[in-house]
Image: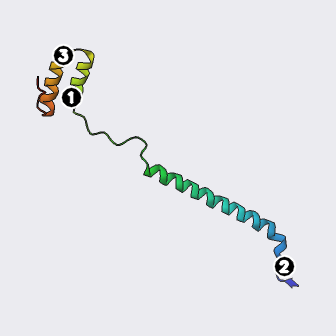
Amino acid sequence: MDHRFGPVREIRLHEWGAVHVIFMIVVLALLVLLAVWLATNIRRQSTPIAGPPHPPQDPALTEARMRYARGEISREDFLRITGDLSGAPPPGP
């Protein structure tokens, strides 16, 4: 049958069957990749990379620890300084 744009040719299903199968495989593969990507991103965001956050440290206490570790102050001085800075009562004799 002629048409004004030329002869009309019917496209039969069996001629395009392989193309549809390949297209569906590609679409399914993309959906699987998307699901895996989403699952890994959700898991990565929900689990902390490091441990729980540390409470903020007092720089004066940190300096006292460093001076004690370097041997610049004695144990008694360290206990007195840390007791004064932390507000804890000094240890007994």
- Where, quadrant-wise, is the N terminus in this rendering? bottom right
What's under tag 1, amino acid-wise? Leu
* Residue 74's disc number: 3
- Dot 3: few (<14), some (14–19), or many (≥20) neighbours within 10 Å? few
Q: In what element is the residue under mark 2?
A: loop
Q: Residue 8's x, y, as percent?
A: 85, 80
Mark 1 = which residue?
Answer: 61
Render colour scheme: rainbow
Q: Residue at x 35, y 43 (%)?
A: 52
76 left or right of 30? left
* N-terminal-most mark, 1 or 3: 1
Q: CA distance from mark 1 to mark 3?
A: 15 Å
> Which residue is at 14% across, 30% downward?
85
SS state under label 3: loop
Closer to the N terminus: mark 3 or mark 2? 2
| Front of the two marks 3 and 2 | 3
Residue at image mark 2:
10
Which numbered mark, 1 or 3, is in the foreground of this view? 3
Residue drawn at 53 percent across, 56 percent down: 38
Secondary element under disc 1, as helix, strand or loop, is helix
In the image, residue 19 lies at what x, y percent?
Answer: 78, 66
**Residue that extends furthest to the right in the rendered view of this protein:** 1
Amino acid under disc 2: Glu
